[in-house]
Each structure stands twice: as structure tokens, then as C-alpha cells.
Image (cartoon, rainbow, N blue to C red):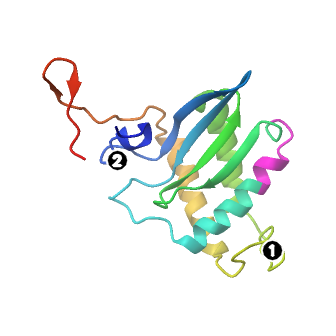
Amino acid sequence: MLIPSFQVDHTKIVPGIYVSRTDTLGAETVTTYDIRMKHPNIEPAIHPNAMHTIEHVVATFLRNDPVWKDKVVYWGPMGCLTGSYLIMKGAPDPEKDLAPLMIAAFRHLADYEGEIPGATAVNCGNFRLHDLAMAKWEAAEFVKRLESAPSFKYPTVERIKVEGDRTFFDS
């Protein structure tokens, strides 16, 4: 069976903030968010150098935010390079809580000047794989999208029902 993230219709998803999954770990709820910066398979993916810089600058911003830092579990890029995953303690609302946080984080990156946090041979496994100028451009574009036409609900793949309650999967 396809895992839930592969049941999202990637031909219809647009940049936005989506709940990818919610898990319970003991008494804690942990929510994984899809922070989608690009329209998959339509727009070019984010260059690995820029994505690496986005990871460093946004992770540093989130882990230092006075309101959210204790709720951030993980921030990192998607393998397809069309966005990042944010894992949070609890279940913050994507529209009410996370949109303002992401706008602030990506505005911070769009305006960022100086050394990329943690981009040294001592702190990073591939410290030369960075592009601050392109990361800033990608961040500014994402802020525009979140401010003008945000999306918060995943488009799902419609699956064909066969033989009663059985669902058809093509792979």
C-alpha cells in the first residue's frame, strides 16, 4: 500500500503549508508539515545548494524563535527539492499558527546578510554546497506565494474502487 505522502496528488499540489501526518509518541502528539515551496513537476526544483542554505538559515531561525523553539523537532529538505518538512510537538494550525511563522522565517532568509550559520567544515558535512543568493531569491518568492495565494489542504489521489471495498493501486 502506498504511504500517505505518496497518495497526495503531486500534479495538483501548489506551494503552501500542509499537514503531512500526525503521530502519537507516548503522550505527545507530533505533527509533520509539508512546507511546499514549488509546484512539483511543473516548476524547476530548488537547486541543492540553495536548499542546503535554506535548511541552515531557516532551521537556525526556527530553533531560536522565542515562541516556537521548544516545539520544533526537525526542519529539513524533501528529497524532491520542492520544499521542506517541519516536525513539531503538538498540532499547530497550518493557517493560523504556521503561516505567520513561515512568512517570518522566509522573510528573515530573504533579507539575510552575513555568514550562513553552520557552514564550516567543522559544523557541516558539505559546507561548500551553499548558495545564499539563490536561497534568498527562493525565500522571497515563497513569501509572495504565502501572502497572495496560500494553500493548506492537500489534493489527494482519487483511487478506483474495484470488487466492493477493494482499492486499485497501479504500483
Give the residue at mark 2.
10
Horizontal side of residue 124 vs 134, given as left or right: right
Q: Is the magenta stretch mostly helix, strand or loop?
A: helix
Residues in magenta, as a range: 60-67
Tell me residue 4's x, y (percent).
Answer: 42, 37
Tell me residue 32's x, y (percent).
Answer: 59, 38
Q: Which label was assigned to residue 115?
A: 1
Q: How crowded is mark 2: few (under 14 residues within 10 Å), some or many (20 or more)?
A: some
> Residue most toward the left?
163
As helix, strand or loop, the secondary structure at mark 2 comes to loop
Label 2 amino acid?
Answer: His
Q: How far apart are marks 1 and 2 (CA)?
A: 35 Å
Q: In which quarter of the image is residue 56?
A: bottom right
Horizontal side of residue 124 vs 98, given as left or right: right
As helix, strand or loop, the secondary structure at mark 1 comes to loop
Q: Quadrant of residue 155?
A: top left
Q: Which label was assigned to residue 126?
A: none
Q: Are marks 1 and 2 in contact (CB under 8 Å)?
A: no
Label 1 amino acid?
Answer: Glu
Q: Which residue is drawn at 59% across and 32% down?
A: 94
Closest to the observer, 142 or 47: 47
Q: Residue 45 in magenta?
A: no
Marks 1 and 2: which is nearer the front?
A: 2
> Residue most toward the top?
164
